[in-house]
Image: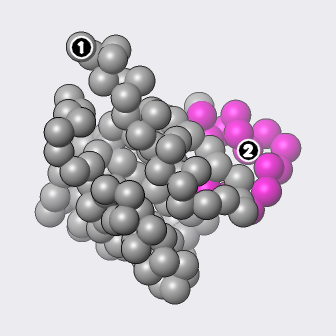
Amino acid sequence: MYSSDHRPVVLAVFDDSERSALLKMSLAGRGWDVIRAHTCEQARLRAHEQHIDALLTDLVLPDGSAFGLLRSLPARPLVAVVLTWGNQHGIRERIVSSGFDVHIVRPTTAEDIDHDMRETLARKAKRTA
């Protein structure tokens, strides 16, 4: 169960290392421990090494997709967020039906991402309390 008295851990999976580094700094400044990965394989390895509270990922990655990544993690994170560059027809429904909690369409801000992840964590914590 998520506890608000610990620093939540987010696994951020983006193939763009510059954007990934900026996002890490922004989310770390908002109280997250951020673990970065650039591929599905790296993300799976990181998730085996450490518990994660949240997954934040691009939809398309160099070696797969967010859909396959979420299914292949050793444990389901409390919150799973996918970012896309547009709202293609039917994509939101597919994202939600694949187990993601939040779909964010770019451009967006770290503040918005932080808000959506924390809101989802809090909502899930209330359900299990």
Query: Is residue 50 toward the left or the right of residue 89 in the image?
Result: left
Q: Which mark is residue 129?
A: 1
Amino acid type at circle 2 is: Ile
Local SS, label 1: loop
Q: Is residue 70 above or below residue 12?
A: above
Query: Is residue 53 toward the left or the right of residue 71 in the image?
Result: left
Gap between marks 2 and 1 measured at Cα:
32 Å
Q: Which mark is residue 6?
A: none
Amino acid type at circle 1 is: Ala
Whether residue 62 is in magenta: the answer is: no
Q: Quadrant of the N terminus?
A: top left
Instruction: Report how many numbered discs are placed on residues in the image.
Output: 2
Residue at x 22% of width, y 51% of height: 7
Question: In this picture, which residue range is highlighted in magenta?
Answer: 83-96
Name the residue carrying label 2: 91
Query: Is residue 6 toward the left or the right of residue 58 in the image?
Result: left
